[in-house]
Image (cartoon, grey):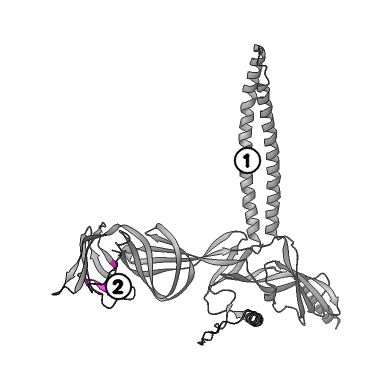
Amino acid sequence: MRTVFLLSLVLVVCIHALPVRAGVDQVILFPDGCQITQTESASVSKAGADLWEAVLHLPSSADPDSLRIHPLKIPEASIQNIGHTQVRAHDSKRIAELKKQLRELSATRDGISAALTGITSRIQLWENAVRTVPETEPRLEDLHNLSASLEQVLPSLNRDKSAKTAQLKEVKANIAEVQKELEQSMDNPDTQLEVRVLLAAPDLAAGQELPVTISYHAKHSRWRPAYTLEALPDKNEVHFRWQAEIVQKSGRVWNDAPLQISTGRMQQRVTPPDLRDWIIQPRPQPRPLAEKAGRMQTMDAAVAGAASRNDAVQSGYETYDLWDVGRQTVYPGREQLIPITRAVWSARFERILRPAVDSRAYLRADVSAEEAQHIPAGKAMYLVQGRTVGTREFSFTGQDAELSFGPDPQVTGTRILEAKKEGEQGILKNKQKMSWSYRFDLENGKDRAVQVRLEETRPQSRHDDIDIELASPGHEFHPQDNRIIWELELKAGEKRSVPLQVTVTAPPDMDLISPR
């Protein structure tokens, strides 16, 4: 019996003496925040009969309403209550290092500034000595002595001043850099969230370090997408790369932490918004001012009541994609790029020519992905065969998309008005007629054939008596965007002209307006 008791005592002591492995256990990053799960070493103090209070500290950006304590690894222990408050921050290791650097750099700056002030004063002293030399009959010996002293002292002082000025500039730049990192490392470096957990447990000890795993939401650490799209027309491919740009402001290093990227937002609607009633009724008659004022007060009360009811609407997650990027070390205060995925999409390339507004052709790719894509909106860098052409917003949903990669100066087109005529027609001249004769001159300056899509706006009639006729070989009309389209292939070095005849007929007494 004595042996069993001693063995049990040894087991309890060993459990209490186990080292606490504190650190970040998991991070899920959203575009508008993150969910952090971490294990902290909480100090335990007596709070009553079989009651204990464990205290731990979180970043000030932690959302108190999202706190969740994971089950404790202590037999017969249960959580009775969780409280929280904002307190003065205890600096984390990283924040303490940054503040130490800032203090050291500030001391160095003050020392250099003092030395620079002394050098500047000495230079001014010698300059004043020159100005105080008597203007009338100065002694030649005095002039020689002053000149020799200036030649010996001033060059050295000016060199020292230049060197100290450069040092001061460099130190100030370093201070600004550390201050920026400190500001970006935490949303509020002066405070933190103190969490107090009331536990019921029979065999804890005052001063014991208890491992507590806690999850919470934080708004100031998030991710945003960074895309790269490279067009390779010679291979009929578009190469896509997706990276996550991480902004981390927890104030501590996420060291070798499992990291996941969510395309959904941290807070979203669960249910669709209600549709408003569509009411059609007679227009109300104007009311006297007094009656109207009383009615407005009633309406204000109703609106206030509706607002208070809307405050209770629940928000949550909808559908989203989750990308597991493995274990990552993410430092606070630094923007860090983490690769998400990459793909090669097959593409059909053609040049879009709109000579009415631009003589240059624009490279467009009709891409097809093997699987449906769910790529959220974000900034993308566009390249053509390794050369950057610009940045713009990008998103991709589904399997097919149209991507534009900027102008191609080697493929051009111009629109030339060859003739414009006005007159009357018919046996009795009962109609007026207007006509435009255009010619599109296209040129392919490349050493290979290219597909060209020539586009022009189709003239539109705003009256039933106005008739419009078009004449041009090979054109198609796209009513969805009201465009005339020619799908062409221009061979290497080819020049080609495409005619377009537009004829408008209308009653003779109708005053027609046309911008061309």
Q: Nearer the viewer, residue 26 or 457?
A: 457
Magenta stretch encompasses residue 39: no
Q: Where is residue 295, by image quadrant?
A: bottom right
Q: Is residue 283 above or below residue 414?
A: below
Residue holding disc 2: 460
Tell me where the magenta segment starts and ends, as one range. 454-477
Q: Select label 2 or label 1 by which is in front.
A: 2
* Numbered circle sitting on residue 167: 1
Looking at the image, can residue 269 be seen? yes
**Seen in the image, is 380 located left or right of residue 329?**
left
Residue 270 image point, x, y percent: 57, 82
Which is nearer the N-term, disc 2 or disc 1? 1
- Give the quadrant of the C terminus: bottom left
Count every numbered label the image shows and give the total: 2
Instruction: Describe the element under mark 1 as helix, strand or loop.
Output: helix
Q: Amino acid at mark 1?
A: Gln
Along the horizontal axis of the image, is 208 left or right of 314?
A: right
- SS at mark 2 in the image: loop
The answer to whether residue 471 of the structure is visible from this angle is no
